[in-house]
Amino acid sequence: MKRDGFFDASMLPRRHGGADDGPEPRYDFSTNANALGPNPAVLEAIRNTDLSRYPEPTYRELRVWLADDLGVSPEAVVVGAGVSELIFRLVGLLGGPVLTQPPTFGEYALAAGAMGQEVQKARDPAAFLRLLPGAALAFLCVPNNPTGEVLDDTFLQRAASVAARSGTVLALDLAYLPLSEVTVVLPDSALLLFSPNKAHGLTGIRAGYARVPDPDLAGALRNRAPSWVLGALGAAFLGASLSPEARRWLSRTVPRLHAWRRSLARGLADLGYPVIEGKANFLMARLGRAAAERLRRQGIRVRPLGDKGLPAWARLAALGPVAQAALFDVLRGEG
């Protein structure tokens, strides 16, 4: 994976939901964005954004709004061009081994590989706790992507305690927490990563932020960013996502997404496909490669999980009844 003395990140697998080099699908189950989006309240704010000017370079006002929402100081808030960008910034800043618990979001390992850092993989929560003191940075996705599993509060608090004693930075990726069926008590000492574009159905806008309890780490993380790391659209999006109107819309959509996920799970199980159904707006199904390719040929995209060591499995988002009917038709051989 090295070329001319440099790590060649292009050799690492990059596979996500959403757009790829194939034709535009009829129904895209591969992306985990809120299928009822985009949020009209947020979209209106974005459309009214002045794109002729740079945003304020320190994002002070935006950080005050985000900090007020989190109940922390503005100095504890770091904004970025999406959580993936913040992950790369974190890994590059901290150095040292990066701990993950696969299968999970691939950017953690990708960032570690791109920065030449070791990736440690825990096979289960007990192993995660055991390996935690040896890592510089540890990631947990809550709910996890792609399984939808939500680790319980007791485990999260214990992990935070172990990390604090060992000097490890524990980062909790909360991309899907607004779309989860369960609430979570988050440890005060953990670094929290927020990417609300999933919940509001606007993944085309790359904007995220972090709550960083350590003031020295927060300052160093801000200083490591390029100038205007977040554009005017991203700043407007993050601010608008906090509005009461945006949150009312989100709260109305989440129960319907969960109902769609349960319907999707039942339909797949009725067709004989094993399903792992967590607490988020997506699930995993053992479709097999042939079925996934057949769906793709019929304009229905799912997210294969071969890059996560699960070649027979795919992740599917909770889409509505029309999309599900088309999916089931193809799987029955009727599409």
Image (cartoon, rainbow, N blue to C red):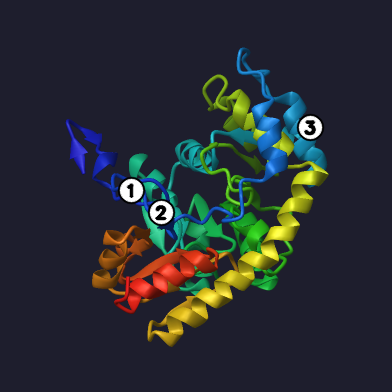
Pointer 3 or 2: first along the chain: 3
The residue wearing badge 2 is 106
Residue at x-position 38% and y-position 54%: 119
Tell me residue 228's x, y (percent): 57, 21
Using the rendered image of the protein, determine whether residue 151 is visible from the camera's viewpoint.
no
Tell me residue 82's x, y (percent): 54, 39
Residue 64 image label: 3
Name the image quarter holding the C terminus.
bottom left
Q: Which one is in front, 182 or 161?
A: 182
Q: Which one is in front, 33 or 184?
A: 33
Indicate left or right for 44 with 162 as reference: right
Q: Secondary structure at mark 1?
A: loop
Pointer 2 or 1: first along the chain: 1
Tell me residue 59's x, y (percent): 69, 25
Q: In which quadrant of the rendered view does residue 122 lie?
A: bottom left
Q: Which one is in front, 290 or 143?
A: 290
Residue at x-position 65% and y-position 28%: 47
Inter-mark Cα distance, 1 to 3: 35 Å
In this rendering, which labeled residue sits more in front, label 1 or label 3? 1
The residue wearing badge 1 is 14
Q: In which quadrant of the rendered view does residue 310 lie?
A: bottom left
Residue 282 image label: none
Mark 1 in CB contact with mark 3 (< 8 angstroms): no
